[in-house]
Image (cartoon, rainbow, N blue to C red):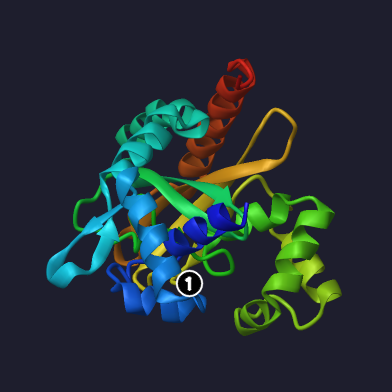
């Protein structure tokens, strides 16, 4: 198990900011010997998880791309939500995004463009702020007490900086205020020029799985009927949750 943990820790080093490493850099970051690091890198290379890039630096390998496609094509939430994203975008003429909850973060699953000039601020696979903007806040509002407490314990400074509360009691009250309606509007919290509305998407057990968001440019927001947008978004939410409930359990 220790060896498997080391292999996983190597993969967890990678991010958009750090996409290539030398063996020396990996050994230094993980506090491992260079000989052990080389053995671990060889194992990862054999299975396609990493490969040589420029200047003999290690980059993520083709196996990661294969796994990404599997995750994308078999995601129950994306399977249930894609048709509704397309319908909602066609109905409103606006950009629609779908995100999923992952640990203490929200990750983009996909989007359908209504306004191609609009910047949504994230793409599929990128982390979306949990504490800024309606996309994450509606998920906070639907979290069970224990899950919400874990989020607070792991992110007290970020929560305070976002104005969501200095204490657990304040944060809990703020999060619960996000669920007073089945949707939440925010303006300029993530991308300054955008206005957005989101609704949480729950699984068959009632736990939040992610959210669906409609985004528009602030300058054009007055041209849209907000009540109609709210109705269409809630219609999509119900359709997606009904589809999720009909899907057979995994395995």
One can see residue 9 in this view: yes
Q: Quadrant of the C terminus?
A: top right
Q: Residue at x 56, y 45 (%)?
A: 210
SS for dot 1: loop
Horizontally, residue 130 falls left or right of residue 97, namely: right
Q: Nearer the viewer, residue 192 or 54?
A: 54
One can see residue 94 in this view: no
**Residue 4, position as x, y percentages in the image:** 54, 52
**Residue 60, position as x, y percentages in the image:** 30, 56
Q: Residue at x 56, y 34 (%)?
A: 237
Q: Residue furthest right?
A: 169
Q: Residue furthest left?
A: 54
Q: Residue at x 39, y 60 (%)?
A: 39
- Does 206 appear above or below 103? above
Q: Residue furthest front?
A: 35
Horizontally, residue 147 falls left or right of residue 133, namely: right
Q: Nearer the viewer, residue 157 or 243?
A: 157
Horizontally, residue 38 falls left or right of residue 251, namely: left
Horizontally, residue 244 falls left or right of residue 11, namely: right
**Residue 131, position as x, y percentages in the image:** 59, 68
Identify residue for label 1.
189
- Does 158 appear above or below 57? below
- Does 164 appear above or below 64? below
**Residue 5, position as x, y percentages in the image:** 57, 57
């Amino acid at each position: 198990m220790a060896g498997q943990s080391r292999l996983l820790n190597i993969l967890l080093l990678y991010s958009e900011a750090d996409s290539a490493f030398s063996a020396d850099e990996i050994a230094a970051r993980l506090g491992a010997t260079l000989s052990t690091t080389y053995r671990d890198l060889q194992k990862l290379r054999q299975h396609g998880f990493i490969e040589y890039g420029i200047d003999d630096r290690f980059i993520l390998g083709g196996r990661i791309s294969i796994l990404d496609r599997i995750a994308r094509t078999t995601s129950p939430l994306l399977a249930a939500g894609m048709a509704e994203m397309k319908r909602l975008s066609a109905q409103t003429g606006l950009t629609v995004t779908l995100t999923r909850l992952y640990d203490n973060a929200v990750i983009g699953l996909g989007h359908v463009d209504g306004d191609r000039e609009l910047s949504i601020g994230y793409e599929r696979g990128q982390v979306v702020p949990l504490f800024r903007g309606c996309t994450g806040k509606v998920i906070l509002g639907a979290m069970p007490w224990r899950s919400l407490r874990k989020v607070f314990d792991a992110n007290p400074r970020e929560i305070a900086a976002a104005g969501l509360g200095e204490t657990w009691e304040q944060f809990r009250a703020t999060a619960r205020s996000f669920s007073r309606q089945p949707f939440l509007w925010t303006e300029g919290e993530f991308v300054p020029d955008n206005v957005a509305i989101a609704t949480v998407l729950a699984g068959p057990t009632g736990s939040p799985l992610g959210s669906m968001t409609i985004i528009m440019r602030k300058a054009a927001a007055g041209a849209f009927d907000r009540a109609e947008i709210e109705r269409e978004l809630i219609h999509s939410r119900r359709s997606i949750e009904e589809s999720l409930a009909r899907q057979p359990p995994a395995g």
